[in-house]
Image: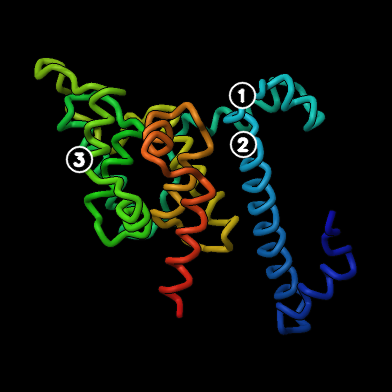
Amino acid sequence: MTPGPDLQQLITTIKTDAGSDDELQQLATAAATINELTTTSDAALGFFVDRARGAGKSWVEISAVLGVSKQAAHKRFADSWTSKPALDRYTERTKAVVAAAADVARERNHAFIGTEHLLLAFFTQPQAVATLVLLAHGITADSVGAAVDVESPAGPKSAEQTLDADNPPYTRRTAHVLQGAVGEALTLGHNYVGTEHLLLAFYRDQAGVATKILLQQGLDEATAWNDIRTILDRITK
């Protein structure tokens, strides 16, 4: 295990980053640094909790590893799955995909926004990194749409409902993906959430409709990861 910075190293780093001998400036820098470390640590821990849950591990097993009660582990991590996802780090293109997912749900006469709607919404942004990865593997709007018809058939016209734009009815799995994308961005060292991070977040839950479809159509997590890195390397050169 690689050790983190010790206290003296952290103090030295904060003083350097502050760029001033002023005590208040150093305090402000320390507060910002510690907050960032805490946020990153929480996201990293949540990433591995998500992995464990996606692999079928129980909250009892997870809480035992974390050294907390089942109730504490469940409250800290499970409750966030159903809360309204924070989209402040999302790129405009990614926000457009999320918005389009609601349109897809309406078109299918669904009163909820599932991972299948989010997957179909990628194709509204043909130049998005996630969409480029899908198309490179022959996964198209038509092939995904046909698979969604099997896994989550469109509802009857009479069942159509207006989705609340201010409080979208995300399923728990969709909220999980939207929030998990932040962890995927941190893993890649990015300070933004792109469509590629949404795509990777699907694989956190093997039981999700979108994940099932991706695997059925031949795109596993390792391949998606490698393709994303290749595209991003090409873009940044």
Residue that appears at 44% across and 42% down: 178
Disc 2 on helix, strand or loop?
helix
Q: Does residue 39 appear left or right of residue 205 in this picture? A: right
State how many labels appear: 3
Quadrant of the rendering where the C terminus is positioned:
bottom left
Secondary structure beneath disc 1? loop
Residue 165 located left or right of residue 227: left
Q: What residue did someone put label 3 on?
A: 142
Mark 2 sits on what residue? 51
Q: Position of residue 3 (x, y in %)?
A: 86, 59
Please state which of the two labelled residues, at mark 3 or mark 2, is closer to the viewer: 3
User: In x, y percent, where is residue 74?
Assistant: 64, 25
- Give me the C-alpha separation between circle 1 and circle 3: 31 Å
How busy is the neighbourhood of tag 2: few (under 14 within 10 Å), some, or many (20 plus)?
A: some
Q: Reply above or below: 128 against 156.
A: below
Callout 1–callout 3 Cβ contact below 8 Å: no
Circle 1 packing at 10 Å, graded few (<14), some (14-19), many (20+), is: few
Disc 3 from disc 2: Cα separation: 30 Å
Is 184 left, or right, of 26 in this rendering?
left
| Point 30% across, 49% down: residue | 138
What amino acid does circle 3 point to?
Asp
For label 1, the residue is 56
